[in-house]
Image (tube, rainbow, N blue to C red):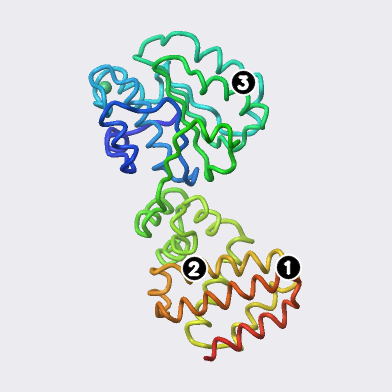
Amino acid sequence: MAQWTQQELLGAQMPPALAQMVDSGRLVHALCLEGDPEDRRLTALAYALAGSVLCRRQKGRMCGECLDCRKVLEGVHSDLFVGAGTAAAYKKEAIRQLRQQAWQSPSEGRGKVFLLPNAQLMSVECQNLLLKLIEEPPEETLFVFLCPNRYQLLSTILSRVVTIALPPLETEECMAQLRQQAPGFGEEEYRQAALLSGGSPGKGVKLLTDEGEKKQAQTLWQLLDAMSAGDGYRFMVLMAPWEKDRAVYSQLLVALSRLLGSDEVRREKKISLARGISLRQEVDRTRQRNEANGNTALLSAALAEQLRR
Ligand SMILES: [Zn+2]
């Protein structure tokens, strides 16, 4: 279990819909928190919710000082269960055990909390085992499914939980998390990774440390430079190595389109909003043609031609 400072949990950013539920003491019994699993805010939020259920001093947000809160902060509360978050750990046997635990009365707190990180890694069978439990939950119990994308969960689960999405991190915040999670890089590299990842520290760490991801990130950065400068030739040279594999080519175009849609990236690359919109349309059109089996080299050449306008 994780350990937290008071400030991290008491100051956990709650999206407005969630804050309202917690503050009014009307927290639902099953939630899905959608966000990057590597984003520390997501886990902090889940623990803060656990604190609000277990705190013995007050309803609403956790006080941070009572015995229960202190145990939540230290990650040792016996009524707080945290799944291991791996496919190997989410076995049927483990889920059956969890169901039993849920039906036992709390051993010290006001209720029980089950945090399920990377819930998307649960098999259909395991999710179905949990379904009945969240349909008719024991009293004073909170289940929190954490996952990067809600649609990776069964629709039957989704229909019984309230889903709260965490907005992406601002560039500066994302850089701060990257410095912690992947130390030893330069400020410019952190900035690039934060921008290219769209504010997702999990993706950002991969961009910094995984050779394949790094190469693609550099290409994207340079493609944006070429687009900004209207340098069609340079654009074609950069695209060439990615033309062999149609799926990879599409991925690159999806990422490029997303970046052209980011205000911060366009500002950084000195691309105006109007030009960003028209370039994005061209990139999307190129991707559609690629998916309709167009010749990738010709598609790159046609796109490069558009840059000169
Ligand atoms: Zn408390």
Decide: is 188 above or below 161: below
Decide: is 217 above or below 199: below
SS for callout 2: helix
Which one is closest to the eye, mark 1 or mark 3? 1
Foreground of the two, 241 or 278:
278
Rendering quarter of residue 245: bottom right
SS for callout 1: helix
Location of residue 199 in the rendering, given as x and y in whole percent from the top left corner:
43, 56
In this view, which residue lies farthest toward the bottom? Answer: 309
Using the numbered discs, state the Cα–Cα distance from disc 1 to disc 2 in whole angstroms: 20 Å
Location of residue 229 in the rendering, given as x and y in whole percent from the top left corner:
48, 86
Residue 284 disc label: none
Image quadrant of ligand 1? Answer: top left
Foreground of the two, 182 or 66:
66
Mark 2 or 3, nearer chain start: 3
Residue 246 disc label: 1
Residue that label 3 marks: 94
Q: Residue at x 30, y 31 (%)?
A: 22
Mark 2 belongs to which amino acid? Leu
Mark 1 or 2, nearer chain start: 1
Rendering quarter of residue 112: top left
Residue 259 disc label: 2
Q: Residue at x 47, y 53 (%)?
A: 200
Query: Relative to 100, is 80 on the left or the right?
Result: left
Location of residue 188 in the rendering, given as x and y in whole percent from the top left corner:
42, 67
